[in-house]
Amino acid sequence: MDNRQFNRKEINNENYYIQEFGYNFCQDFTYTGYIKCKLVHNSYQSIIVPDQIYLESDKLLWIQPLNFFPNILYKEDDLIIALLNIDISCGNTIKIEFRNKDFIRSYEDGANLFKCKIYGPTELDSYATGTCYLTGEYIPFLHLYHHTTEANKQSIINSGYFLLSPWNIQGNKTLSNIGYVYLTSLDKIKTDNDLRQIAMASNEKMYFITDNVDIPSEITNVWKYKHSSEILELKVYRETTKERESTLSLKVNATTLSPQHLLRHSFKSDPVFYEIISQFIYRVGASPQNNVYFEDFTIKRENNNIKQLDYIICGDATTIKGLESPFDEENTSSIFKIEKCLNKSCILDFWFENCNKDHFSNKSIEIQSFNKNE
């Protein structure tokens, strides 16, 4: 059975997360909603990265982008139109259309919110990742989860705050200048494949392969040996589902979430696209000496000392080092810096008013630092 919410097939009490995209291509139905997105730069290009899509339905829903294609922008007099083709759950590719005149507001994390049109399949609401709401100030709150033991759950509830985790996404190095609360949109962690979606594994291992390698229906030891130089064996945090059986349900200010990293795919026969890695992992960051507080099971910006680093990592999926970089988070120079348009024009106006300029070299940002004694 397909689980449209979490992009997986559920067979005999196992969850198999879908890796193919674009096979249910239909953009015949039009919906309305909002898109939260950021403009980011490296030394030679700029891209708009979608954070979340908010779908207007009987209640407001949100959709997690899985992959997205290079942006299409064009200008007609004073009107700027942006088109983003985005892969979502169960092989669907939707198209988002928004204009500079649809701009609503900017946020402290560097994102903009736009009213948008959404072109996709029938019953698009059935592919939503979860429920959400917008405040009167257009602050989006997502329903997310934290999975832990029952003892830890009760301790968190009694204290009213989360202790910060010092671990990077890969779970093998500790950070010195920031800590995180790790959350997920998955409502339960039942299987090893669920663990892998939050960068954990009972055997400490996850596997990735570089672009342009044909993967057979049955993977043999001979095939693995032949392609050993193209397969990444990633060591991740060792965990079992027994340690994630109790769940806290939370409402989280989406502007407090740290940006998600990317992989850039460039298969020989297909167009370039960007994969949002660990799509079901969400992090709220703060300085190491702080906690992250919640009230009425709601994480707000107002009563927390939120810390956000103004860049994302974009690894090159044609190389082993590039595959590893969004997880390792340390040994990489493959970064995009976030353009903050607070008190400026929206990101679409900024794009055309400042085109063909270097927005990377002179932008000063703080980078995650790691404890060196490990």
Image (tube, helix red, strand yellow):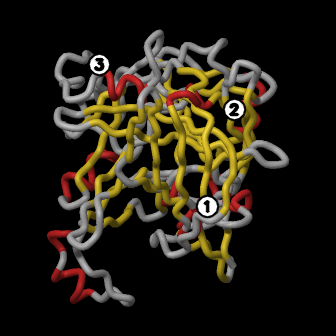
Which is nearer the eye, 282 or 42? Answer: 42
Residue at (74% x, 64% y) in the render: 123
Residue type highlighted by circle 1 = Gly
Which secondary structure lies at badge 1?
A: strand
Which secondary structure lies at badge 2?
A: strand
Disc 2 marks which residue? 141
Q: Label 1 to label 3, Cα distance in Å?
A: 37 Å
- In the image, residue 148 sits, relative to residue 302, either above or below, namely below
Disc 3 marks which residue? 365
Residue 49 in the image: state x and y as whole percent. Answer: 42, 40
Disc 1 marks which residue? 120
- In the image, residue 344 sits, relative to residue 68, either above or below, namely above
Residue at (53% x, 67% y) in the render: 193
Q: Nearer the N terminus, badge 1 or badge 2?
A: 1
Q: Nearer the N terminus, badge 1 or badge 3?
A: 1
Q: Label 3 to label 2, Cα distance in Å?
A: 27 Å
Residue at (67% x, 25% y) in the render: 139
Residue 333 in the image: state x and y as whole percent. Answer: 18, 37
- In the image, residue 307 sits, relative to residue 57, either above or below, namely above
Task: Give left or right: position of 245 versus 363.
Answer: right
Task: Give left or right: position of 199 versus 282.
Answer: left
Q: Nearer the N terminus, badge 3 or badge 2?
A: 2
